[in-house]
Amino acid sequence: YGHFENFFFDYYPELAKNKIGVSPFTLQDGTIEKAMNFLKNFGLNRDDEFVLLYLNEDKKMETPNVDVTQYVTSVNYLIDQGFKVIRLGNNKMSSMLERIGFIDLTKIERPMEVDIFVSAVAKFYFGSCAGPYPLSSTFGVPCCLTSQMPCRPSRPNDFVQTLQFRNIRTKQLIPIEHWEPVGLSGEAQYTHFMRAGYEPSLPTHTQNLRLIKDMLEYLSGGAILSLNQAAKEQ
């Protein structure tokens, strides 16, 4: 399935030194055939460019649940740009929208090869740091992560939107530089922030749309890629 949590962050310097790639997975022909035989019934052709979407709504996880309604604008924008959007998940997840180009598989029984295929060949992964994200990452697919916990390590090839927190009492947004001095760093879970007196400020549809536009600019080699490259040494 692919390593998860902090594995690649902790071992990346050693892997890079020994020229060991962090994206070792490749698709088998049988997986492609079985997945495409299923997906063609939903209007997906083999040469279609698509984005894989997964938004965490699992209340048992120690991470904030996203509000899926705040991602509809982003999905519509991607479709307007010529992409199809394939959503993975389970039948307990909320409905989002109905539109040609949006393939919502959350409530549809499907072969496991479908999830493997779409995770491996998507233009990029978009959504929570959960679900099929580690699988896409291990296939080498660029990943655009929403609502990432502050100070959480990122893998190579991740493009991250950091979740903002605010003081529960004052409602003031807290800058990211605040966390490590108060002891809430990369290992902190969502519940740790809440116990320390902070609550999440979930991103709005406008912020999520900006994230998608930035991701597309990054992938196309635009100004935001140059900005990241300029900070590489730092």
Image (spheres, rainbow, N blue to C red):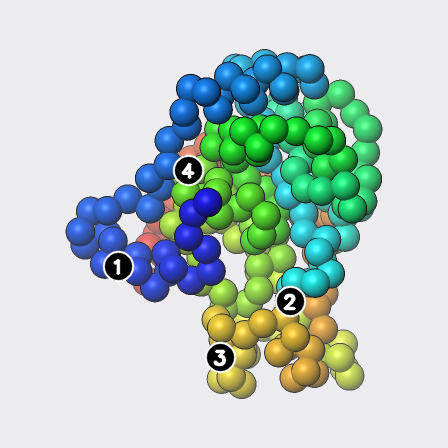
Q: Is residue 62 above or below residue 51?
A: below
Q: Say which amino acid is labelled 1.
A: Pro
Q: Pointer 1: residues within 10 angstroms few (<14), some, or many (20+)?
A: few
Which badge, 1 or 4, is on the more N-terminal residue? 1
Q: Nearer the viewer, mark 3 or mark 1?
A: 1
* Res. 217 visible in picture: no
10 Å crowding of disc 4: few (<14), some (14-19), many (20+): many
- Amino acid of disc 3: Glu
For image coordinates 23% across by 52% down, the residue present is 16
* Residue 180: assigned label: 3
Which residue is the site of mark 4?
A: 139
Mark 3 closeness class: few <14, some 14–19, many ≥20 residues within 10 Å:
few
| Crowd class of label 2 (few under 14; some 14 to 19; many from 20; radius 10 Å) | few
138 w.r.t. 174: above or below = above
Q: Are marks 2 and 1 in contact (CB under 8 Å)?
A: no
Of the two numbered discs 3 and 2 in the rendering, the one whose residue sits closer to the viewer:
2
The x, y position of residue 23, in whole percent, is 35, 41
Q: Amino acid at mark 2?
A: Glu
Tag 2 residue: 62
Residue 14 position, x and y percent, is: 23, 58
Name of the residue lying farthest toward the left: 18
- The Cα–Cα distance between marks 3 and 2, rounded to whole angstroms, is 19 Å
